Every structure is written in structure tokens, then in C-alpha cells.
Amino acid sequence: MSKKAWTYVLTVMFTGTLLVALSIPGFHLENSHVLIFIILVLLATFSQVYEVEGTFRNTYYPHSVFFMAAALLLDPFLFSLVVIVPHTAEWVQKRVKKSTNLKAWYIQPFNIATHIVAGYTVSCLYTVFLNNGFLQTLAGSFCIVFLSMIYTIINHFLIGMALFLARSLSFFESGVMKLSFLVPDATLGCVGYIFVSLWNNEIFMMPLALAPLFLLYQTLKIPQLTQDAQLDAKTGLLNAKYFNRIVTTQFDEASHARRNFSFLMADIDLMRNINNTYGHLAGDVVLAGIAKIIQQIIPDHNHAGRFGGEEFAIILTDIEDVEAKRMGEAIRKAVEEAEFRVATHPEPIKATMSLGLASYPINGKDLMELTYKADLAVYQAKKTGRNRIVAFSDLSTEEIRMLRMKPKTSKFENNSELDLQIRRALDEEQFELYYQPKVDIRSGLISGVEALVRWRHPERGIISPVEFIPLAEENGLILPLGKWILEEACRQVKMWNTFTRRHCPITVSVNVSAVQFQREDVIELVNNALKETGAAPGWLEIEITEGILMDNTTYTIHTLKNLKGIGVRIAMDDFGIGYSSLSYLRNFPIDTLKIDRCFVTDLDKDEINQALVQAIVSLSDKLGFYTIAEGIETQLEKDQLTKLGCFGGQGYLFGKPMSALAIDTLFKEEKALLNARRLVAVGE
């Protein structure tokens, strides 16, 4: 945590401690107080240690009933003990079970302090109401609600401030001040007042104490409906829609504050066999049981979701990737050791999980990249025997190369759903093109851009092409989508070259899938896009992979030559991770060779990759190709590429994929830079 957050947490803890210390000299033990104290300590401890089904993350502790009663009935010191003893008991329980929920030492002292501050405040207000006779009037019900809300708001506000200072979470993002958090605790506070009325034998106060519960009954439905919309019915975890919203927010906060962020994906192994052997209802029991295991292991401030089927995803923030992997291993082991029982089968059901981990910032700088790499890691775990966890950081270059050639899957439940949603997305213009700049490393000027498609789903937010492109290729929907991408990219490059007035024309690169490229009308498709938009052929570059080049080489060479005949440029993408058959290079009419990012990462430290890059650059120069290195993220990598003779670059060092409007801004900045250079050159 930051110094500011530590200062706040310790201040609240010190305030609570000071209030306890100040209450010791003046408190007087009475028989009634001792009896109330014993009863409330036992009840509060029971409610604190044993979880009750109901609210956030499917569990809560109804200790607010007893804390409210203690604040109003007991001396300050005894009230403090009613708060301290249950929290201490819970801490001991978690330590014995080796739970990660209360790993940080300061969590329980801070929780105790927030309840003590809230309780002392309510106790003072209660005395004021009592002395002025408010509780004996018709206003008594409102006073009870007011006391309960004050207790709850103070407690939640202090926790919310800690989350804001420690994790940069606003009150809206943490949710601590939402009705779904406030109303249940406030209602329990009203129940606590009923305890007070019964103990004081004030039967006439019972209707006043019960009245707020009837008033709050309808209000309680609001957070419950909100929660139902956020949770998966079978597991109680966040559903895919709400989880995607949470993961986007959490990642943005982590990247802004430069905190660690890990994305853990998990698949139940051979779930189809469980359903076929025991039935789908038994499969639901396994799903629910595994979800409960995940909830018990991950820390409270993290989130887990279910995407449908047997797939889970977990967000882990503020922990190192080593610790995230350890937590994933704990989940795997707990699932392996668990036994799931159903009434229809005498023998317990056993299950295992395969997990994949990707961490920010070491495995990727954006959320799409992390989810993609976590998915690859899960596939590697399944491929190498299942029932294990694989971190993307532990994969070798060869393993990554092979994994990238695997058929990808989608989080959509079935192809027909994807079919309908892509068609609707095309009709409703939900797709967007982002552009990543390609630069001349020596001058720093933009030499072109690569067009990258994004799907802005109305419910799930931004969806990575890794998720929908493979199934779009299977269903043939890549054809209308690819046509739109090509036309939109040509339309945009036409606008840039017409109105930007750069020193040289801008080019746009468009990735063409194997499905599109193998169709006989691909030449007509490109021609029509150029004619309809008015873009010059030389402004368009078609990017293809080595896999396309190796498949049906006679047809491929013929198609590429026809594209070159139009005037379109050709680039080979991800060179070095596919077939890399050097004998074929001289036969293909290629203009640009793009070195895959796996050779560029940590290039300044890896002598083998330096030798490989130098060989690729030398070969490319001999064949008359222009060479671009992908995935440049550091100045050291850029400098090393310059030494090796590679002068084309693309990567986060120069710019992430961005909107067309953001590219316009880059062009303006580039123009200002060129003007400044001219002034310097002429001595002005």
C-alpha cells in the first residue's frame, strides 16, 4: 500500500484503540452487563466464524445485530470486547485453515477499529435520543432507522476510504456505499434494536422497532435483484456479463496505478464425461462445489466468474505472479482432493482442473493480450496431461509457437449464438477499427499503420478478435466481416492521404485470413474496396501469415502476383514462428517481412535472438524486402534493432492500437516536429 493508505489505516486503528483505552477507567461491571456481554460475545462469535448464505459473494456475517445491541446496552469497554473477540476468533480460524482471505495482518485490527468508531458514534446519538424522549414518540421508528444507517454508513465509509487509498477504487467501483451493501447491514441493525427492546423489557417499543423492517422489506428486494443480475445461477460466481465489466475496471485501475494484475483461467477437465456418466444435475453439483472452493481460496477483494460450460476466470490483484501461481495451485489441489456427492450415486464424484495464468505487466500490456495468453496457458496445461497449472511466463518460445497454431475457442456458448450476434453487430455497426502505427526507427516518423478490428459489444464491452475471429472463420462470417474491415481501412486511408498532407503517403495494413485468401473472388474483393473508397492501391498492404503461403503454393503465388499487379503491397506477418521455409521466399512477391515479437522481447539481453534477427534482416535485405520488427516495447530493444540494421518498427514503444482520431493527433505532432527540424536546419 501507499504511504497515504498506511497513514489512513493506522489512524483509524489508533482511533479505535484510543477509544477502548479511554473507556477502561470509567466502566463499571454490573451483573446485567456481564450477562449481556457473555450472550452477545457468544452470538457475535458464532455469526462471525460461521458464514451465512445470502448476500455479496453468497455469504455474509450477521454480526451487525449483536454489535448494535452491544453499542446501546453495554459500557464502552465491554462493547469493544464484543467487537474484538469475534474478529479475533475469525482470525484464528482463518490461520488454522491457512485461508488467504485474512492474509494481511492489519485487516482484522482495521475492521475492529471501524466497528468501534461506528458503535461509539451511535451510542452517543442513542443517549441524545433517549434523553430527549424521541424514542418514545412516533418518531421512534425513524430514529431507529437513522441509528442503524449511521452505524452502517460510518463502517462502510471507513472501509471504502481504505480501498480508495490502497487500491485507487472509487466508492462507486468498490460498491461499499451501494444499497446492496448498506441495506442488509442497516436492517440487521434494526433487528439489533429489537434485542435491546426485549432486554430492557420495553414491550411498547417492539412495534416501533419492527416498523423499520416493514419499511425496508421492499428496499431489500432492490439489492437482491441487482445481485441476481450479476451472479451465475449455478455457481454463485459473477456471470460473464458482469465479470467482463469488473475485469475491465480492475485492469484499468491496476495499469493506471502500475500495480500487479494476474488473470487466471480454469477449465474443469473432462466435464463432458462427468455429465455423461452421472447426469447433468450431478455436473451442476460439481460446478457449484468447485465455485465454493474458488471463493474460499481467493482473497475477498478479488473476483471470480463463470463464462458458461466448465470455464472459470479469476482476477488476482496486488500480488506477484509467483503468489498468483501459488494460489492457482492451491485451487487445483483443493479441487483434486474434493469429493462431490449426489444422492443418485453412492460413490463420490472426483474432478480435476487445468489452469492458465498470465500476469500484467510481464506477459502483456493490455487486457486482450492477457486473456489470450492465459487461454494459451490453459491449452498447454490440458495438452501436457491436465490437472496442472501453467504460467505463460514459464512457456518456451517453441511451446508458444505451437500453441499459436492451435484452433482457438470462444467464450460464446455455441456457434449459432455467435452467428446471430456477429450479424447483428455488422448491422448495428458494433465493430470498430483501431490502428497501430508503424514507424521508421531512425527518424521516428510514421511509415504506416496496421488496422485491427475490435468488437464493442453492448453487454460485454470490448471483445478481443482472438475470441470471435476463429469461429467467424468456421461459420463463414469472416467474409462479410473481412469485407467491412477492408473497405473501412481503405476509406480511412483515403481520408488521411487527402486531408493530412504528409511528407509521404500513409499506408494501411490489413490482415487477411486463410478463409478469405483461399476464395476465388479475393482479387475482386480488394479491387472493389479500392474503387468504392477511391483509395490508391499503393496505400493498401495485405498481411498474410506463413501458413497461407505454404498452403496450395501454386494458387497462392498466382493470387499474390495478381494483387501486386493491381499495385497492392504484400507483407508476411509473424515471420519466424511458422514454417519459415527459406526456399519459398524467393518465389513469393513479398514487399515486407515482419519479424515476430518473440524474437524482439528482451532482444538486448538474448544473444541467440540477436543472431537470428540479424540473419533475418540480412536475408530480407538481399531479397529486397522491407523489414519491420513487431512488439518493440523498450528503448533498449529499439537501439539493439538499429544496431542489427532493422529500421522498421511496431510496438507499444511507439503506440498502442488506437482510434483514427488519435492517429490524426499523431500526424499533427509529427508535422510540428518536421517544421521544427526544418527551422533548425536553416539556422532559424
Image (spheres, rainbow, N blue to C red):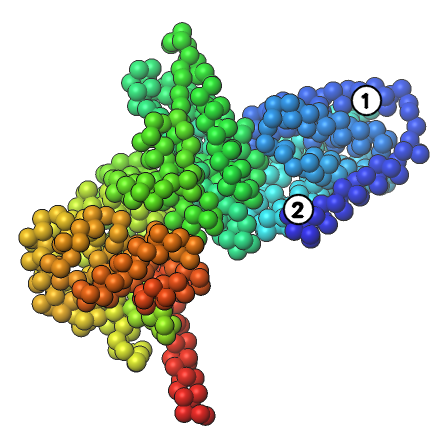
Where residue 250 appears, as percent x and y from the top left, is: 50, 47
**Residue at label 1?**
36
Residue 403 screen position, x and y as percent: 30, 40
Is residue 144 visible from the viewing direction of this image?
no
Name the amino acid type tagged 1: Ile
Q: Is residue 491 above or below residue 556?
A: below
Q: Which residue is mark 2?
A: 162
Q: Are marks 2 and 1 in contact (CB under 8 Å)?
A: no
Whole-percent x and y of residue 24? 90, 33
Question: Whole-percent x and y of residue 160?
Answer: 64, 46
Q: Residues within 10 Å of mark 1 (few under 14, many from 20)?
A: some
Q: Can residue 107 be seen in the rendering of this structure?
A: yes
User: Which element carries disc 1, helix, strand or loop?
Assistant: helix
Query: Residue 453 falls in which quadrant of the image?
Result: bottom left
Horizontal arrangement in the rendering, residue 163 relative to residue 509 (left or right): right
State how far apart marks 2 and 1 are (Cα): 32 Å
